[in-house]
Amino acid sequence: MHCLDCSLANETRPAVGICTTCGAAVCRDCVRVGHNSVPHSTGFSSADLAFTEIRQLACLPCATALSARHAREYGFAPPTLPPVETQ
Ligand SMILES: [Zn+2]
Ligand SMILES: [Zn+2]
Protein backbone atom coordinates (compact mmCIF):
# COMPACT_ATOMS: atom_id res chain seq x y z
CA MET A 1 0.00 0.00 0.00
CA HIS A 2 1.11 3.56 -0.69
CA CYS A 3 0.60 6.83 1.18
CA LEU A 4 -2.67 8.49 0.16
CA ASP A 5 -1.57 12.09 0.59
CA CYS A 6 1.64 11.50 -1.36
CA SER A 7 -0.32 9.69 -4.07
CA LEU A 8 -2.62 12.70 -4.39
CA ALA A 9 0.54 14.78 -4.94
CA ASN A 10 1.68 12.31 -7.64
CA GLU A 11 4.36 10.76 -5.44
CA THR A 12 4.66 7.09 -4.59
CA ARG A 13 5.83 6.29 -1.07
CA PRO A 14 5.33 3.09 0.90
CA ALA A 15 2.86 3.33 3.77
CA VAL A 16 4.05 2.70 7.32
CA GLY A 17 0.66 2.93 9.01
CA ILE A 18 -3.01 3.80 8.79
CA CYS A 19 -4.71 6.95 10.03
CA THR A 20 -7.15 5.70 12.67
CA THR A 21 -9.49 8.62 11.99
CA CYS A 22 -10.00 8.56 8.22
CA GLY A 23 -8.41 5.24 7.24
CA ALA A 24 -5.83 6.71 4.86
CA ALA A 25 -2.48 4.95 4.52
CA VAL A 26 0.38 7.21 5.60
CA CYS A 27 4.11 7.16 4.83
CA ARG A 28 6.96 7.90 7.21
CA ASP A 29 6.93 11.60 6.32
CA CYS A 30 3.16 12.07 6.53
CA VAL A 31 2.36 10.08 9.66
CA ARG A 32 1.76 11.87 12.94
CA VAL A 33 2.12 9.84 16.12
CA GLY A 34 -0.04 10.89 19.03
CA HIS A 35 -1.84 9.27 21.90
CA ASN A 36 -5.36 8.95 23.19
CA SER A 37 -6.78 8.05 26.57
CA VAL A 38 -9.25 5.19 26.65
CA PRO A 39 -11.44 4.93 29.75
CA HIS A 40 -11.98 1.58 31.37
CA SER A 41 -13.95 0.53 34.40
CA THR A 42 -12.16 -0.44 37.61
CA GLY A 43 -15.23 -1.20 39.70
CA PHE A 44 -18.99 -1.25 39.83
CA SER A 45 -19.64 2.48 40.07
CA SER A 46 -19.65 4.80 37.10
CA ALA A 47 -17.04 6.81 39.03
CA ASP A 48 -14.64 3.86 39.02
CA LEU A 49 -12.83 4.84 35.88
CA ALA A 50 -9.20 4.71 34.93
CA PHE A 51 -7.56 5.73 31.70
CA THR A 52 -5.16 3.80 29.57
CA GLU A 53 -3.01 5.77 27.18
CA ILE A 54 -2.75 4.24 23.75
CA ARG A 55 -0.85 5.23 20.65
CA GLN A 56 -2.79 6.84 17.85
CA LEU A 57 -1.64 7.39 14.28
CA ALA A 58 -3.03 10.10 12.06
CA CYS A 59 -2.51 11.60 8.63
CA LEU A 60 -1.57 15.27 8.51
CA PRO A 61 -5.10 16.60 7.77
CA CYS A 62 -6.61 14.58 10.61
CA ALA A 63 -3.79 15.44 13.05
CA THR A 64 -4.28 19.11 12.22
CA ALA A 65 -8.04 18.87 12.68
CA LEU A 66 -7.81 16.91 15.94
CA SER A 67 -5.08 19.16 17.33
CA ALA A 68 -7.17 22.27 16.70
CA ARG A 69 -9.52 21.40 19.55
CA HIS A 70 -7.95 18.43 21.29
CA ALA A 71 -4.22 19.21 21.29
CA ARG A 72 -3.72 18.10 24.89
CA GLU A 73 -5.57 14.83 24.49
CA TYR A 74 -3.87 13.65 21.34
CA GLY A 75 -0.47 15.28 21.63
CA PHE A 76 0.53 14.72 18.04
CA ALA A 77 4.19 15.25 17.40
CA PRO A 78 4.99 18.38 15.41
CA PRO A 79 5.48 17.88 11.69
CA THR A 80 8.77 16.27 10.77
CA LEU A 81 8.72 17.72 7.27
CA PRO A 82 10.95 20.73 6.66
CA PRO A 83 9.06 24.02 6.43
CA VAL A 84 7.84 24.94 2.97
CA GLU A 85 10.02 27.47 1.23
CA THR A 86 8.19 30.75 0.95
CA GLN A 87 10.19 32.10 -1.98
ZN1 LIG B 1 3.09 10.50 2.47
ZN1 LIG C 1 -6.71 10.82 8.45
Image: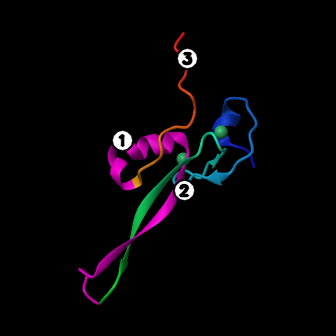
Q: According to the image, label 1 marks what residue?
A: 68
Where is residue 54 shown, x and y percent of the image? 48, 65
Where is residue 19 shown, x and y percent of the image? 57, 52
Where is residue 4 shown, x and y percent of the image? 66, 41
In which of the image's four quarters is ligand 1 placed?
top right
Q: According to the image, label 3 marks what residue?
A: 85
Query: Residue 37 bears which disc, if any?
Result: none
Residue positioned 46% across, 48% down in the render: 76
Query: Residue 20 bears which disc, if any?
Result: 2
Circles 1, 2 touching at the beta carbon (< 8 Å): no
Element carrying mark 3: loop
User: How far is the residue under mark 1 from the one under mark 2?
Assistant: 17 Å
User: How far is the residue under mark 2 from the one under mark 3?
Assistant: 30 Å
Instruction: Tell us which disc is closer to us: 3 or 1.
Output: 3
Residue type indicated by callout 3: Glu
Q: Is mark 2 within 8 Å of ligand 2?
A: yes
Label 2 neighbour load within 10 Å: few <14, some 14-19, many 20+: few
